[in-house]
Image (tube, rainbow, N blue to C red):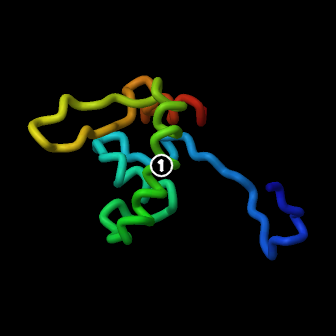
Amino acid sequence: MPKSKDEFETLYGYLLYEPADILHPDYMYTVSEIARMLQGLDPTTDLAEDTEDHLIEWTIPWIVANEEQFVINDPRGDEPGYFGLHPDVIEDETDDESDEE
């Protein structure tokens, strides 16, 4: 059932990050690590299992919606898959320098 906005003490803008805003171009991350980073947390932060499950539920659709901006590895054994930035979305340092001229 919808609720009136008046029922809430605080309302925040809904901000979705671009993958390049939170991921380092030289690293690969698990979904769990990306979920933490989307919340402004260190990727190694310990979370309660139910909290982590909720964050992952929000992160998977974000990854799917941004699929063209990611690369994924071929998982080994029982290891999770790792996601990283696709080379086409990583800004080249030389591009930054030429933009400044």
Amino acid type, residue under disc 1 in the picture = Glu
Does the image show residue 88? yes
Q: Picture quarter containing residue 74? A: top left
Q: Which residue is mark 1?
A: 57
Residue 94 is at least partly visible in this image: no
**Is 43 displayed left or right of 74 in the figure?**
right
Name the one closer to the observer, 101 or 38.
38
Is residue 51 positioned above or below 90 on the image?
below
Q: 86 and 50: which one is in front?
A: 50
Residue depicted at x 44% and y 65%: 51
Element under disc 1: helix
Quadrant position of the C terminus in the picture? top right
Residue 84 drawn above or below residue 21: above
**Is residue 29 shown above or below 76?**
below
Location of residue 83 (image quadrant): top left
x, y percent for residue 92: 43, 31
The 10 Å Cα crowd at callout 1, few under 14, some 14 to 19, many 20 or more, is: some
Count of numbered labels shown in the rendering:
1
The location of residue 1, given as percent across then percent down, is 80, 55
Farthest residue to the front: give it: 1
At a point 50% along the width and 54% down the height, the residue shown is 38
Is residue 85 or residue 39 the one in the foreground?
Answer: 39
Residue plotted at (62% across, 46% down): 16
- Residue lying at the far bottom in this picture: please name it: 9
Name the foreground residue: 99 vs 35: 35
Q: Quadrant of residue 48?
A: bottom left
Q: Position of residue 24 (x, y in %)?
A: 37, 46
